[in-house]
Image (spheres, grey):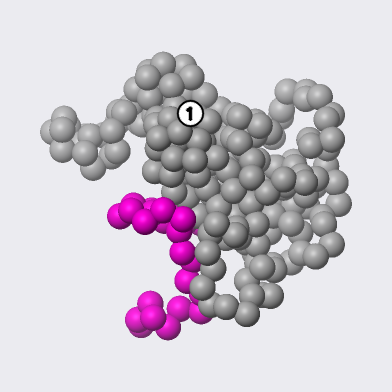
Amino acid sequence: GSLALADFVLMGEARHPFWGLSVSTAGDVDGDGLDDLFVGDYLNSDGGSDAGKSYLVLGSTLAASTSSTIDLSNADFTFIGETSSDSAGYSISAAGDVDGDGLDDLLIGAYSNDDAGTNAGKAYLILGSTLAASTATTLDLSDADFSFIGENGGDSAGYSVSTAGDGLLALARTLCSRPLARCCRHSGQGHRGRIGAAGQARPERSASPARRAVAPRTR
């Protein structure tokens, strides 16, 4: 059928050809029984040129909306890339309920992050409990609950992120700093890669107010 018949249209802040390249269910982040929506804009420049930005729209927001057009400048939460050219939001995903608190969590990939070397890449985990406790709707990814950093320059860790089920997170690491299609065209060879899985076991964290598990907000 025609997309003109869609129930809702999500309008990006920036108009460029690759806006909305990555979209995903977010699971039920706020525990209200409604699934939520996750949209990535890896070329957004709020955090620096092409730092990237991701948007979370709650199911309750859609249910209460009197308009079929949702401007993402009014998203319930936004997540801004740390540094210019990080491309945060190129890959996004629900993480499932990683910490077992009844709230689903979020994954964001930034495959061009340079923390461990040029284009080593980085992925971020944001807990639903952190969002429930937050008084801010815009979060910098430097404040993510956990981050996963590529091993070497050119790894592009976070090029693809996903839940792996049963409390595991799958973080795909490509061995090329370019997106897949361009990399393969450039090299003329098969695309090599590696998948890492991170389990539920986690290092201890300080129990700051923004990090403690809390009950879902009443909406």
Magenta residue check for 19: yes
Assign the C terminus to one quadrant of the image: bottom right
Mark 1 closeness class: few <14, some 14–19, many ≥20 residues within 10 Å: many
From what the image shows, is residue 129 above or below residue 114? below
- Residue at figure coordinates x 61%, y 36% from the top left: 140
Q: Is residue 136 above or below residue 64?
A: above
Quadrant position of the N terminus in the picture:
bottom left
Q: Position of residue 28 (x, y in %)?
A: 68, 59
Residue at image x 66%, y 32%? Answer: 143
Nearer to the camera, 138 or 106: 138
Residue 60 in picture, x, y percent from top left: 69, 68
> Is 182 drawn above or below residue 35 in the view shown?
above
* Res. 178 image quadrant: top left
Reply above or below: 79 against 11: above
Q: Is residue 50 magenta?
A: no
Report if residue 159 is visible in the image.
no
What segment carries the magenta color? 1-24
Magenta stretch: helix, strand or loop mostly: loop
